[in-house]
Amino acid sequence: MISRLIAAATLALAALPALASEAMPELKVTTLDGKAFDLAAQRGKWVIVNYWATWCVPCIKEMPDISNFVKSRKDVTAIGLAFEDTDVADVKTFLEAHKVVYPIAQVDPTEPPKDFGTPRGLPTSFLIAPDGHVAKRFVGGVDGKKLGDAIAAGK
C-alpha cells in the first residue's frame, strides 16, 4: 500500500511542469483592466505569481497579505491569476470587495499558462527572482513573512 502511494506521488510530481530553480517561465496575460502583463518585462524585481479563486477561503485570506507585502517593497510586484470558469464581471465584482494593489488576470482552467500549468491546489504562488527564474513555489496560503524569508534565502 505504501509503495503504491509513493509511486502515485512520484507520478504526480513528474506530471508537474518543470519549475526547478533554473526554469525561466514565460507568462503573458491580459489583466481585467485590459492591460498586457508580461513576466519578462518585470525583470529586476521579485514577482509573485498567485493562482487563486473567488470561492477559495485561503486565497481570500492571503490576498491582503500579498497586497500589503507588495506595497511595502519597491523590489516586489505581483500578478493574480483568477483560476476559475466564471464570468469576468463576477470576478470584477469580487475584487470590488477584496481590493488588491496588483493586477489580476483571469485564466482558463482548461488552458492554464503553459509554463505554470494547472495548480495542484489553491492558492498556489510562485516567487520569481529578479533574473526570471522560479525561486520558490508555495502550495497553500502565503504571508509577508514567508515571502520575505524566501526572498532573503534567494539573494
Image (cartoon, rainbow, N blue to C red):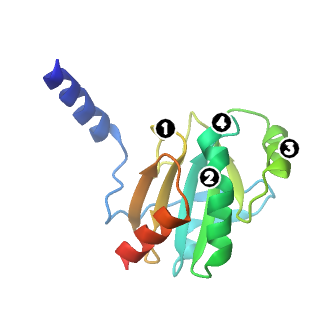
Tag 1, which secondary structure?
Answer: loop
Instruction: Indicate the quadrant containing the N terminus: top left, top right, bottom left or bottom right.
Output: top left
Rendering coords of residue 138 (x, y %): 44, 52
The residue lying at 68 percent from left, 73 percent from top is 71
The reply to whether dot 2 and dot 3 touch (C-beta < 8 Å) is: no
Query: Disc 3 designates what residue?
Result: 93
Which residue is the site of mark 4?
A: 84
- Looking at numbered disc 4 in the image, what kind of residue is underneath it? Glu
**What amino acid type is highlighted by mark number 1?**
Gly
Residue where numbered disc 2 is placed: 62
Q: Calculate the distance from the C-alpha at mark 3 to the C-alpha at mark 4.
A: 14 Å
- Judge whether residue 63 can be spotted in this image: yes
Q: CA distance from mark 3 to mark 1?
A: 24 Å
> Which dot, 4 or 1, sits closer to the camera?
1
Answer with the quarter of the image where residue 131 lies.
Answer: bottom left
Q: Label 3: how many residues lie within 10 Å, few (<14), some (14-19) or many (20+)?
A: few
Disc 4/disc 1 C-alpha distance (Å): 12 Å
> In which quadrant is the C terminus drawn?
bottom left
Of pointers 2 and 4, the one earlier in the residue sequence: 2
Q: The disc labelled 3 sits on which kind of residue?
A: Thr
Q: Residues within 10 Å of mark 1 (few under 14, many from 20)?
A: few
Left or right for 147, reference 34? left
